[in-house]
Amino acid sequence: MTARALPCIACGRVLEAVFVSDAAVQPCDGVTFRGSPGYGSAFDETPGELEVVVCDACLDERCQRVVRVVTTHTVTARREGWDPDTLG
Ligand SMILES: [Zn+2]
């Protein structure tokens, strides 16, 4: 498969690439998903990441199955004594 052939994993429709680089492949009218299979998957031992494309129509049709993840960061700090003669 060439980098410009971006078939939707659900319907197989081939999407045109908006741009292709070593870091990202962006289809027109679709979304690229990338991730590593985790523990519990038959593909857990796969080195690197897997990448799939889903066309916007398939994503919209199945939106009930999609979860949006919003990453939040909690900042914590500890306070401790300071001795300028030691590092660490
Ligand atoms: Zn599709």
Image (tube, rainbow, N blue to C red):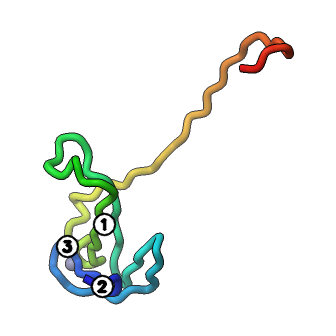
Instruction: Give the x, y percent position of residue 69.
Output: 39, 51
Ligand 1 visible in quadrant = bottom left
Q: Earlier in the sequence, mark 2 or mark 1?
A: 2
* Amino acid carrying mark 1 in the image: Glu
* Mark 3 or 2, closer to the camera: 2
Residue beneath label 1, please?
51
Residue beneath label 3, please?
9
Residue beneath label 2, please?
2
At x 34%, y 86%, the residue is 4
Which residue is at the front of the view, 76 or 47? 47
At x 29%, y 82%, the residue is 6
* Mark 2 or 1, closer to the camera: 2
Whether disc 3's CB lies below 8 Å from ligand 1 is answered yes
Side of 23 relative to 28 (left or right): right
At x 40%, y 76%, the residue is 25
Q: Earlier in the sequence, mark 1 or mark 3?
A: 3
Which residue is at the front of the view, 43 or 60? 43
Secondary structure beneath dot 3 equals loop
